Image (cartoon, grey):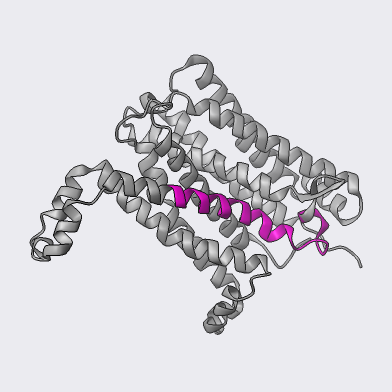
Amino acid sequence: MQEEWGWIIAIYLFLGGLGAGACMVAVFMEFFRKINQCVSSCPVTLVGATLPGPILAIGTLLLIFDLGQGLQKPWLIINLYTHFSSVMTWGTWILTLFIPISMVYGFLEVMDFKSEAWDWLKSRSWIVKMGKFHSFLENFQLKRTKQGIALVSGVLALGVALYTGLLISIVGPAVPFWSTPVIPALPIPILPLLFLTSALSSGLAITVDFVDSVLNHDSHEHMSRLPYYHLAVILVEGLFLGLLLFNANSSGGAAAQSAEAIISGPYSILFWLFVVGLGIIVPAVIHGMQSSRKKRLNDNICLANAVGVLFSSLTMRFVIVAAGIHAIL
């Protein structure tokens, strides 16, 4: 079993997926408000825009903490920016750009959501005294600028979501399970796609179900179609998860041993109870009920579903990381 990577790496991968997924949901709502019956200030967009930056910053700190050299010799981190043939360098640049840009997007979304906050900021005496800057703020195209920043954030969020899966899939053939392809004859790893759909599911859970049950902002009027989207994402995630285990088991060797450890071995309880049960079956039933009834369910059900999906997403990453077995060369 994989002894070097454990919960810290799993948490980093989870936070990366959660932040990226929440941002992608916010950007989707940003540009398709009318389709989703969200023509004014949307709490789903607010939550999805403000959470990613801090979440990714925390996740990155955890990764640096887990990398011993990151604490002992922090100046060596600069090397991560210079090896452009390395996937680690790609991810480092994506994260470096995404965290501040998503924070700017979150700030602009707050200013747009609470227009009085924007007016308050412009009216501050120290702002007024800065003549040219005050004039700039008075003529600032808040909505248009926010949409431009949102578009950039969305592209980077997609990169982050895919990268969290690509990061460990490139370790193959050292750990064959992690580089299991979508189709045996096609050398495209399935983990980036699985982590992308998981990120979207987590993003929908933290924004839609959180908004539904905690903020209670009459949010169902804003997202009557989102249960359909979440149901589709969950089904695709289940498909990718099944393909990962089936293809790994069919390939034999260390990959098959990893799949066996998940399906019927030491990680089977975590897998079937939390990953499959809480992450796929339960939310599929809940969102299927929401879609068929066309009305939101009890707040406690929505909150419990959100917690279940998030815990399942974290557990899935831990199980995949921990079950990785090194190939015998």
Q: Nearer the viewer, residue 299 or 208?
A: 208
Q: Position of residue 186 (x, y in %)?
A: 83, 47
Judge from the rendering whether residue 15 lies leftward or rightward of residue 43; answer left or right.
right
**Image quarter in which the C terminus is found:** bottom right
Judge from the rendering whether residue 223 lies leftward or rightward of residue 234; answer left or right.
left
Residue 263 appears in the rendering? no
Q: Which residues are magenta?
A: 151-178
| Dominant secondary structure of the residues highlighted in magenta in the image | helix
Q: Position of residue 212 (x, y in %)?
A: 40, 32
Task: Look at 74% across and 47% down and name the residue there.
Answer: 190
- In the depicted structure, whether residue 162 falls above or below residue 72: above
Task: Look at 8% across and 65% down and name the residue there.
Answer: 129
Q: Position of residue 60 (x, y in %)?
A: 52, 65
- In the depicted structure, whether residue 259 falls above or below residue 218: below
Judge from the rendering whether residue 231 lies leftward or rightward of residue 116; answer left or right.
right
Magenta stretch: includes residue 153: yes
**Image quarter in which the N terminus is found:** bottom right
Judge from the rendering whether residue 83 lies leftward or rightward of residue 154; answer left or right.
right
Task: Look at 53% across and 83% down and name the residue there.
Answer: 75
Task: Look at 66% across and 62% down and name the residue there.
Answer: 6
Q: How many marks?
A: 0
Magenta stretch: includes residue 129: no
- In the depicted structure, whether residue 180 falls above or below residue 229: below
Q: Nearer the viewer, residue 256 or 236?
A: 236
Report which quarter residue 215 is drawn in.
top left
